[in-house]
Amino acid sequence: MAGVKYAKDQPAGFKNHVENIAIVGASGHIGAFIAHELLKTKIHKVTALTRAENNNTNKFPPGLSIIPVNYSDPSTLVNALRGQDVLIITMSAFAPRDTEAKLIQAAADAGVPWVMPNEWGLDGQSTDLVREAMTGPGREAARNLIASLGKSSFVSLVCGFWYEFSLAGQEIRFGFDFPNRTVTFYDDGQTKINVSTWAQCGRAVARLWSLKIMPDDEKDTSPTVSTHFRNGFVYISSFLLSQRDMFESVLRVTGTTEQDWKIQYQDVKQRYREGLAAFQNAGDMMAWVKAMYARDFWPDGSGNYQAVRGLHNRLLGLPDEDLDERTKVAIDMVENGDDACRPKD
């Protein structure tokens, strides 16, 4: 196959697998699950890059190496990344805008061959969706920066919205207000979108970086990072759900009936316009969240990326998950906070 590199042709000492992985945000929502699953493989040395002033390292999974860095001193980033095979960036959407660019530049300067940019959600190849959801420009800029520096290749994870986090996340996300037993259906509540759990995202990343980097030789047809995912996207999903599907699960888990809930309906495009206007006029970040979620539920099918792209669940050996079990976790998060959903062995 033209353009394909083989392990047999590489210099002496070449290792056809990833060993050293650096992660930014290892104590965060998705980062904790990624770090946890990588450590479980027993084949990776995982290092967390953390701000020198971070006093929250007790939330890091045991077995993680920790290197303090100073984002005002790029040399600390470069030194921390030397010898790493992969840099995984997981940060809040509200993190300083230049932080990711500093990390990508440092990865290039340190010769890190692979970068997973801070892109954990909507389909980056669905240009209308990410433009109108206002998630696209920053993520595209990160991928373009990686390409322009010419030292690293990117792999981005498309997982849809995070299921437990979004279900628990008040009415602005999936429309559920648990304390008041109110649900707002967008249109008729029947539009299906792909969603993923944090645990499934963690497993996907761990199994991605457990693949061989390239085929051993011309006869090797096993999946590899280079042949399947270099400068591309990994598509995974836990569930393909409508709000109605979520509601049925909520009823089962809580033992309630529809009569116990106040059900409202809203035109999804009107909801999007409301959120967009409040964000543009007042800089209300929660209004942006409202608009972003509403956009994924438009009836154009853009939230159902598996229908267009397919999924890599089977290639990565990801397990099926129990919807009601994950719904119960979401409800626990409503009552006890995000710590109700942390990695467990």
Image: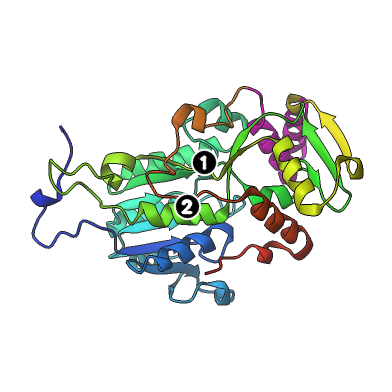
Position of the N terminus by quadrant: top left
Q: Position of residue 231 (x, y in %)?
A: 34, 40
Amino acid on which disc 2 is placed = Glu
Residue 51 image point, x, y percent: 51, 69
Which residue is at 56% across, 68% downward?
344
Q: Which mark is on residue 51? A: none
Specify few, some or many for label 1: CA neighbours under 10 Å numbering under 14, 14-19, or 20 or more. Answer: some
Q: Identify the residue under disc 2.
A: 100
Q: Is residue 212 above or below residue 57?
A: above
Question: Can residue 284 be seen from the camera position used here?
Answer: no
Quarter assignment of residue 330: bottom right
Please say if 186 is above or below 166: above
Q: Main secondary structure of the magenta part?
A: helix
Q: Mark 2 and mark 1: span between their CA atoms?
A: 10 Å
In the image shown, does 15 or 100 lie closer to the viewer?
15
Q: Quadrant of residue 266?
A: top right
Note whether residue 117 is visible: yes
Furthest toward the top, the residue is: 300
Classify mark 2: helix, strand or loop: helix
Mark 2, Cα crowd under 10 Å, few <14 / some 14-19 / many 20+, is many
Q: Residue at x 71, y 48 (%)?
A: 167
Quarter of image, res 87: bottom left
- The amino acid beneath tag 1 is Gly
**Residue located at (21% from left, 56% from top):** 16
Tag 2–tag 1 contact (CB < 8 Å):
yes
Residue 162 sits inside the magenta stretch: no
Q: Secondary structure at mark 1?
A: helix
Magenta highlight range: 270-299
